[in-house]
Amino acid sequence: MAMGGRNDNRGIMAEINVTPLVDVMLVLLVIFMVTAPMMQQGVQVNLPKADTKAMTPAEETVVVSVDKNGKIYINKDEVPAGDLRERLTTLFASRSKKEIFLKADAGVPYGEVVKTMADIKGAGIERLGMVTEPAQK
């Protein structure tokens, strides 16, 4: 029996060492698992604080944001206030899971937030999640 990878009948055998590949893939998997929750879309707003149970996001999250000036955004695209319902109806026409997240700045008047929620519900969205900061105990 010869050492060094020789087989008496077939000659030299070439084998691929997959250990470094597995190590790299595991590192990449850990990096993606850590960074994926941080990749939420939308516009930066000063969120109100609330003590509620978190919703689990869908695979393609849509975030409607209302900034402190009352401007409305779908993900990062600004939308005129009168066009929100129409844009959401078009966006969700082909989706089976009708779920959306609403981020509103803490300084936005309550009436504006309710009006935005009415437009979202009017577009046929079944689940509406309010994005807030965790309340300090």
Image (cartoon, helix red, strand yellow):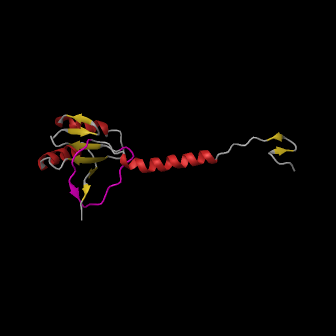
Question: On the rendered image, what quadrant is the C terminus found in?
Answer: bottom left
The image position of residue 50, as x and y in percent, is: 23, 58
Majority secondary structure in the magenta region: loop
Q: Which residues are magenta?
A: 43-60
Q: Is residue 29 left or right of residue 108?
A: right
Q: Residue pushed farthest bottom?
A: 137
Q: Residue at x 14, y 48 (%)?
A: 107
Q: Which residue is at the front of the view, 83 or 103?
A: 103
Measured along the vertical axis of the image, is residue 89 above or below residue 22? above
Q: Residue at x 35, y 47 (%)?
A: 97
> Which x, y percent locates residue 76?
28, 37
Asked whether 107 or 91 is in front, the reply is 107
Residue at x 26% of width, y 39% of height: 74
Q: Is residue 36 left or right of residue 88?
A: right
Q: Is residue 46 magenta?
A: yes
Task: Determine whether 90 is above or below 34 in the image.
Answer: above
Query: Where is residue 38 drawn, in percent x and y?
Result: 36, 48
Q: Residue at x 87, y 50 (%)?
A: 1
Magenta run includes residue 21: no
Image coords of residue 104 (percent x, y): 20, 47
